[in-house]
Image: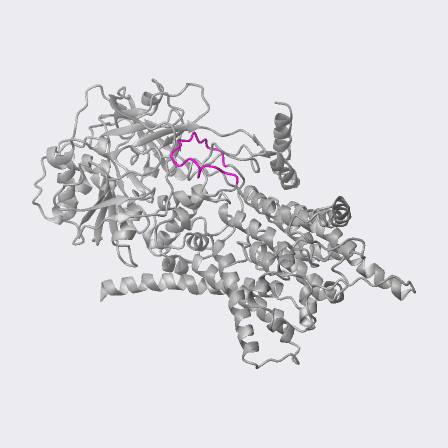
Amino acid sequence: MSKDIKIKKGLDIKLIGEAEQTIENAIISNFYSIKPEDFHSIIPKLVAKEGTHVKAGETLFYNKDNEAMKFVSPVSGEITEVQRGPRRRIDAIKITADKEQTYADFGKFDLNADAEKTKAHLLATGCWAFIKQRPYDVIAKADRTPKAIFVSGYASAPLAADLDFTLAGKEAELQAAITALSKFTDGGVHISVGANSNSPLANLQNAITHKVSGPHPSGNVGTLINKVNPVNKGETVWTVNAQDLVIIGELLLTGKFNAERIIALAGSSVKKPRYFRTKLGSEIATMVYDNGVERDGNDRFISGNVLSGKRVQPDGYLDYYSNVISVIPEGNDYELFGWNKPVFDKVSNTRALTFSWLTPNKKYDLNTNMNGEHRNFVLTGNYEQVFPLDIYPMQILKSCLYKDLDEMEALGMYEVAPEDFALTEFVCVSKQPHQQIIRAGLDLMLEEIG
Amino acid sequence: MGLKQNLHNLREKYKGTKMAPAFNALHTFLYTPNDTAHGGTHIKAADDLKRTMNTVIMALIPCLIFGMFNAGYQHYLAAGEIEAVTSGFFSSEFWTLQNFTLGFWKILPILIISYGVGLGVEFLFAVIKGHEVEEGYLVTGMLVPLIVPIDIPLWMLVVAVIFGVVIGKEVFGGTGMNILNPALTIRAFLFFAYPTWMSGDKVWVEGAVERTKEIANGSTADAISGETILGSLAQSHGVDYSVMDMFYGFIPGSIGETSTLLILLGGLFLVFTKIGSWRIMLSSVIGALVMGYIFNLVVAAGWITDTSKFYGLMSTEFWHHLLIGGMAFGIVYMATDPVTASQTNKGKWIYGFLIGFVSIMIRVFNPAYPEGVMLAILLMNVFAPTIDHYVVQGNVKRRLKRAKIKTA
């Protein structure tokens, strides 16, 4: 039932600073930080109090709504601080790592076990955090049965880490994870790989592989879902990031929660963009300065890609789901006659004295400037050019703004995640925050409909 | 640093005050702000609304300049001081300094009033309501001078612009929220409030009104006829302009809408830059041709004869309709206004087709005023949300059907 997916609508934003395919071991970070906000909508119940010592894989906190769902420490060490925000909300749990890492032993898992056992194992070992669901783009509710599971093995976002490279040699782990996941659904585990790629995900058992081609967002998992088996009302699908399959797989095979991950350090501010072997929640300072960015430069650090990543401070941490750190120049400067002079050094999908259509292969050095001011929605038709899903983007955004739940549902809110609206946000002439609008809409639905 | 730094300091000073929108509006004309993306995408495309609007203005400039020459040309031609053009678009009779000077001094005040009053109202509302001054009026302010008769009294324009901006746009919440095209609201206001000024045969050529008054006061000078082609056709007079004259625009009419050639070029520019919707333009043209052709068939079938008052316009060859009156201008610059047009791609086809279709219908059947494109666009502006609703429902139904197949 494999189906090749070719999309035409979209936009490849080519940026300077793609990571060169060499791996360095990052300086081993002493400090790690886990932020509950990475696990959207989860209310954490803290287990590991300040001052306690945890092994890698031991529970830091669990989900208030489902006590079985644990969130575990990526390293062994001492909990040095639990940062709290207003109303005692937990902002971050900081861990000072041991010199010698020790791991909690969950034991080698029998891959022939049934779905219930597998589920319980993943919940207890902290691996459930890697399984997300749609609708709502939150961590999967363990009591639902998904109609299918989707994994994107093709990263098409600008400056994304090349999954063919970062997953190379991990076939065994990937296979173990896919085998385990395939027990949860009758609809199959669908994996997308680049049409011309040499992906270790391409030949796995118990999975359905789709070759995708076309501009970004061809590699977004949302595009895959929409083209293969879109979510209807009352249905659930699960998604897992390809790089997280490795952690799940290793846990199943060895019983160790090994939070190691290969990430890309990319962006035009980085002197030598390349790959690092590091761990979830690591300080980014251990990677970005050596042959990287100027210490007192005017740069934006992003945990994730430049379209959907999170802004972090230079002393910040790699978030739980990212496999790229992007560093681009801040654009906090004025530009004389920026609104009417011909533009050669920025990307645009119009030709309004913008000339990026002349040089489709040029790589750009974009900064974080808004290139204009926030306005009401005015222009129509330009979102559709970069939006391959069978959904009306402007209409659904407006329905989120005026909070009409029936309309949001009818227009396809169950199918989308904020990242699906990253490109429409990029091209938006009115500079509307599309991803925020969608996130707020999803949160509202989650609260009202559940 | 100098200017940039000083302006930055001023901006910081005004931040949060009532005057901030007014200052920012002026400041951003000089400098794109230093705001950076926060939350969401960290990079943004190069286009903003100012650039978009500026592109439309660029497409309008040729029409404006042509309008200036044409104003002079029509005046001197009617007064018998120059000969009619003979050698195509670049005829030396047309492109003279004399023609331009007259038109320039006549049109400049209209342009200044249009922008001055309109932006004044916009600034006022922005300051009162505390939102930024939006760019929509940059285009409206350029459209207005191009769609009024040359001899329009300036006070009338002032009243109309205020009405159009306040009732047409600001009461709905500003650019992006309005239902009717503001420029056409202004035009419609003029049309319904001062019908004798906006129709008839006196206002289209500079000096015609003046001369009529002089004659009434006993002057012996010849009257200047300022009749438009549509006016003649509506009264079943013949037309003494060649097709090429109509295409090039050497005919009386509103200031900037006569040259179909330049409008066509402007339209192509808008389509090329991806700012104007080719779907609307193309489908409007098709709609107009279809309606015009139906009327031709009606005449050919002998149902309407030259005794009918509709004969003149009905028997006009169907494709000539695109060349005369405000049809082309309306299709390219008015119907494509993204805010008031249909917002879905499918909806744009329907919306455009109906504009063309209804324009010609009104043009033929409206006894008082032989031009339909303004009313047709305003009418379809009102219907655009309905069209969109049904297009979007198609998507919604497909989604529901998908769910049903699954559960069945």
In this rendering, the answer to whether A270 lies above or below B309 is: above
Residue B389: percent from left, percent from top: 45, 63
- Residue A194 appears left or right of B296: left
Q: Is residue B172 something one can see in this rendering?
A: no
In this rendering, the answer to whether A24 lies above or below A92 is: above
Residue B355: percent from left, percent from top: 54, 64
Q: Outermost residue, right direction?
A: B218
- Residue B115 appears left or right of A126: right
Residue A94 sits in quarter: top left
Residue A283: percent from left, percent from top: 32, 25
- Residue A152 appears left or right of B70: left
Q: Outermost residue, front direction?
A: B87
Residue B165 sits in quarter: bottom right
- Magenta stretch encompasses residue B125: no
Looking at the image, which is closer to me, B245 or B255?
B245
- Magenta stretch encompasses residue A354: yes
Looking at the image, which is closer to me, A299 or A351?
A351
The magenta segment is A353-370
In this rendering, the answer to whether A402 lies above or below B32 is: below
**Which coloring applies here?**
one colour
Tell me the chief SS of the magenta region: loop
Looking at the image, which is closer to me, A448 or A14?
A14
Looking at the image, which is closer to me, A301 or B257?
B257
Quarter of the image for the C terminus of chain A: give it.
Answer: bottom left
Residue B408: percent from left, percent from top: 22, 67
| Mark count | 0
Q: Is residue A114 something one can see in this rendering?
A: yes
